[in-house]
Each structure stands twice: as structure tokens, then as C-alpha cells.
Amino acid sequence: MKNLLTDIAGVRVGHADDKALASGVTAVMFDSPVVAAIDVRGGGPGTREGALLDVANTVERIDAIALAGGSAFGLEAGGGVQAWLAGQGRGFAVRGAVIPIVAGAIMFDLLNGGHKAWGRFAPYRELGYAAAAAASADFMLGSVGAGLGATTANFKGGLGSASAATQSGVRVAALAVVNAVGIVTVGGGPWFWAAPFEIDGEYGGRGLPPAFTPDMLAMRIKGGAAATAVENTTLAVVVTDAILTKPQAKRLAMIAQTGFARAIYPVHAPLDGDVLFAAATGEKPVDPLAGLTELGMVAANVVARAIARGVFAATALPFPGALPAWQDRFG
């Protein structure tokens, strides 16, 4: 296993970004349609096909997930991914029509110093198409794709990924775009809140501080008193090779999103738009009670690790006043 989302067979990931724009798109592509659900816990989310993913609604499977910067402008990325899939003849068949089903979510990166005066049309549709076309089993972490313009309250954010397996061999992996209102480190130090779940020093191996002081536990949020509900979001995609129904995928999403709380401080605030997608490729059976519980537990750990890896691998933006990367201080 490569410790990536693509450790799940049939999953590919592609990035497309613009360094001058300081924004981009990441496409999660499925070789075959997957059962999927969504869990939203932030106060300011921006999603595509969120209603379709509700367990009460008819369509169970999706073809791809588009994650993008650009706030509401970035929702157009899903159209670009959809256009690429349509060119491949992929989609939900309705008699003679074929409609690719692309879920998606966006995060706010409009104030990070990049050139956002794009004119009449935002670039996210084209970036979405390029990300879909670039999808492969190997992909970069850090300041790439949808994570290029991401930030946290104290360090540059980014895109991370991680994977694991349950004791019975069911695989689960996560990809996260970390643009949180809070922090991923303990205070301003080198320690990650997700340290207890780290494997093989994947984000520096620093552990936790020897003691916690009040200043470490003080709230640090991006923008301080001027923070708004549309400026911050962490996005995550969790994929497993388990056989799940749509309600079970919803439960997996709910349990897995607790990984946000293991890695970000504070989290799920009215100032965040936190969203997690869960998808199942349907290869291995899982017990619907204890088995699904274990799968969710491991998924939450994997989400926490992906979040920490995203910040650990990030690089600072080349603009005046840009936040430092974790590597700039402690690498």
C-alpha cells in the first residue's frame, strides 16, 4: 500500500491548478460507479449533488467527486469532470441518455494573494476537466490541486492522503483538503493533534508535547474576530472496498468525520464548511454492526492522518504576507 486514496482498487486521483491563481481542482475518479453518501458538519458548506446523496433519494452511485478552491465559483469544477466522463461514455443511463454523476464540494481560497481577476468566466470548469484527464494511481500531496491555496490559522494548508485496513482485510483510505478555520498543530509548535494515529513518521514523528499549557489550548482561528462562515472548509473523501448500502455509507461518513476532531482544533464550527464524502467500491463483505463500526473507527483514524499529512507536505505560497509552511519552521 502506498498510503494513498488509490490503494483502493478502481480509484484514481488527478490534480489541476494554476500557480498564479493560487487555486486548483482535485478529481477523484471511479473506474466503476460507487455507492456514496455525504456528511456535512460545518456551518458554511458548498456542495454539488448533495441532495442526490441523501439516503432518502433514488440514485445510489456516483462516477466521480470534484474538490475545488474558488468558493462558489469552484462548483463549476464538477461540470468539467462531468464533461470528461461524458466524453468517455460514462454515466447514469436514462433510456437513450447517459448522465455522469459527479458530486463535489468547494473551499474558500479567494484571499490568499493569488490573481483572482479572471474576467467573465471562472477557470474551474477547465481545471476540472484537466484534473479528470490527469487522474492516475499516483498523485502528489501538499500544495497541489484543490489544496494549492488552502490555509489554516497558523500554517499553510494542503492536500493529504492516507490508508489502512481493518483486521479482516477491508481497506479504507482518505483524501483531505485542509483549509480549516482552526489549527492542525498543538499551539504554534511542531506537534500535530493527530500524533497518536501517526504511522511510520508520516508527518514528522514529533509525537505530542510533554505537557499541555493553557496557551496551547487557547483558540486560534483564521481571521480572528473578523472570521466569516464562508472562508474556511476542510473537505474529505473516504473510500473503502467494502460492500455497503447507501445508508451504511452514510453511517461510515458520519463516523469517519470524527477524524476531523482528532486532527483540527477547533472543528465543525459555524465558521467552517466541513464536508466528508464516503464511497464503497463493493468488493468485500463487512458485518453490518461490529464490522461497520470497526471500519468507521479505522476510517476516522485515516482521515486524521490525511489531514496532518496535508499540512506536513504543504509549501508556502509565494506572495507577500503568506503563511509559512510547517516545513519552513520545523522541517
Image (cartoon, helix red, strand yellow):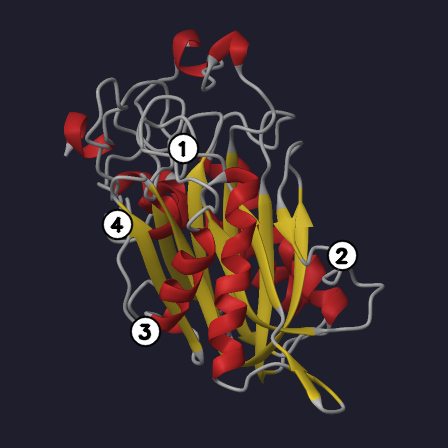
Of mark 3 and mark 1, the one earlier in the sequence is: 3
Report helix, strand or loop for mark 3: loop
Camera-near label (4 vs 2) is 2
Query: How far, Cα to Cα, is label 3 from label 1?
Result: 29 Å
Q: Is mark 2 in CB contact (under 8 Å) with mark 1?
A: no
Out of 257 and 201, give the one closest to the viewer: 257
Look at label 2 and name its amino acid. Answer: Ala
* Residue, disc 2: 51
Look at label 4 and name its amino acid. Answer: Glu
Q: Is residue 327 left or right of residue 158?
A: left
Out of 259 and 198, give the one closest to the viewer: 259
Of mark 2 and mark 3, the one earlier in the sequence is: 2
* Residue, disc 3: 137
Camera-near label (2 vs 1) is 2
| Crowd rating for badge 2 (residues with CA inside 10 Å; few <14, some 14–19, many 20+) | few
- Quadrant in which the N terminus is drawn: bottom left
**Does residue 95 appear anywhere in the picture?**
yes
Query: How far, Cα to Cα, is label 4 from label 2?
Result: 36 Å
Camera-near label (2 vs 3) is 2
Position of residue 207 relative to residue 139, above or below, is above
Camera-near label (4 vs 3) is 3
* Residue, disc 1: 193
Of mark 4 and mark 1, the one earlier in the sequence is: 1
Report helix, strand or loop for mark 1: loop
Look at label 3 and name its amino acid. Answer: Ala
Report helix, strand or loop for mark 2: loop
Query: How far, Cα to Cα, is label 4 from label 3?
Result: 19 Å
Of mark 4 and mark 3, the one earlier in the sequence is: 3
Task: Say the numbered circle drawn on residue 202.
Answer: 4
